[in-house]
Image (cartoon, grey):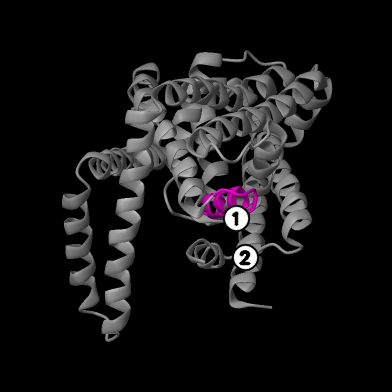
Amino acid sequence: MSNKEKKIKYSIIASLIISIIIILLILYLTVDTDDIELLKNRDIHYEFFIIAAFFNFLSWCLWGLRLKILSNAIDKKVKITWWKSTKIVMANLFLAGVTPSMAGGEPVRIYLLAKEGMSTGCATASTLGERLLDAIFLIICVPIAMFILRNNLSEFGIVGVGLTIGVIVFLIAIFLFFYAVFRPKKIKRMIIWISNKLSRFSKKKEKQKKVIERINREVDNFHCSMMIFLKEKKSVFLASGMITIFMWLSGWLIASFILMGLDLNPFVIDSIAVQVFLIIIIMMPTTPGASGVNEGSSSVLYYFIIGQENSYLLGIFVLIFRIITYYFNLIIGAIFQYKIFKSFASFSLDALKNKDER
């Protein structure tokens, strides 16, 4: 077993253990013997759980449609079908679910797009185009979410502190993101300056040269990719932007259907605002797949939505929510990734670069 596969194995184990422990802790703190009787007598609507699972699948399909449109627009020689792009999305769910900030999904998508005949540059451009669309949409959503939950922000406690830090980091990242699009030379100088400062703690000077070369290459690739969409493919970018809205909303409505399944008010607007905050928290590089962080943050944020009188349902809600949006994703992602790679971490983007050079 390679070091890479060992890291993936440990990430899987860590993410599952942390997630299960936090869910059990939430159940222990929110459910007692009296609450069990209340649960037995509660009118549970299981059909809404099925609808919630369907909306999770719908978000994958919309994600696949967006990837198809972006990929076919940037490389006219290759035609990616909707089903192919959706399979790519499903395969990427596994590594995205066991890596901090969901960072493991992008290399999988790039690799599989390249396997369909796209150059690595075009595959990377398609994936970066997705990130640009997500960034634009989320930066619009964050202030709206803060306005909707303005009365609760001070009551979120330690999660509120983490959320504030997350929003600040997110806004800085978005600023650097757009700065790299329009001022690539300046962003390169800044990143190289930081890299040089950090290199003082390293004795490997040759490695530093490779880091600088990679910074120059990646920033240039990013800039060129974004300019293609912003200048040459505006209509495609706008169409993909509309799909991005529906894709995120489909995922964010899952929680409301689960609440209805538990015979609660769906709290659609408040729930969507909470989901925006959860995305910001998940994007922070904390635990693999944000395990534990997601469960803990969900329990705190939704406590203020469903109210103290229904707090005994909080653990059940978090459990069902994570089964549909995390464990289900991991299982489907693992199936598709293993079916394609016959392994959970066997692909290499370096191999694709060598192929392009030939």
Residue 114 point in image, percent of width and height: 58, 52
Look at the image and say whether residue 122 sits in the magenta stretch.
no
Residue at label 2? 8
Q: Which x, y percent locates residue 37?
A: 80, 27
Q: Does the magenta run of residues contain 116?
A: yes
Residue under numbered circle 1:
98
Which residue shows up at 54% across the image and 28% down it?
302
How far across and down, in percent of the image, does residue 306 sit? 57, 21
* Stretch of the chain drawn in magenta: 104-118
Quarter of the figure with residue 84: top right
Q: What residue is rendered at 24% in x and 80% in y? A: 201
- In depth, the one of 327 and 334 nearer the eye is 334
Rendered view: 306 above or below 31: above
Name the amino acid type tagged 1. Answer: Val
Q: Secondary structure at mark 2?
A: helix
Q: Which quadrant is the N terminus positioned in?
A: bottom right
Whether the residues at callouts 1 and 2 have beta carbons within 8 Å, the answer is yes
Above or below: residue 121 compared with residue 247: below
Query: Horizontally, is 137 left or right of 257 in the view?
Result: left
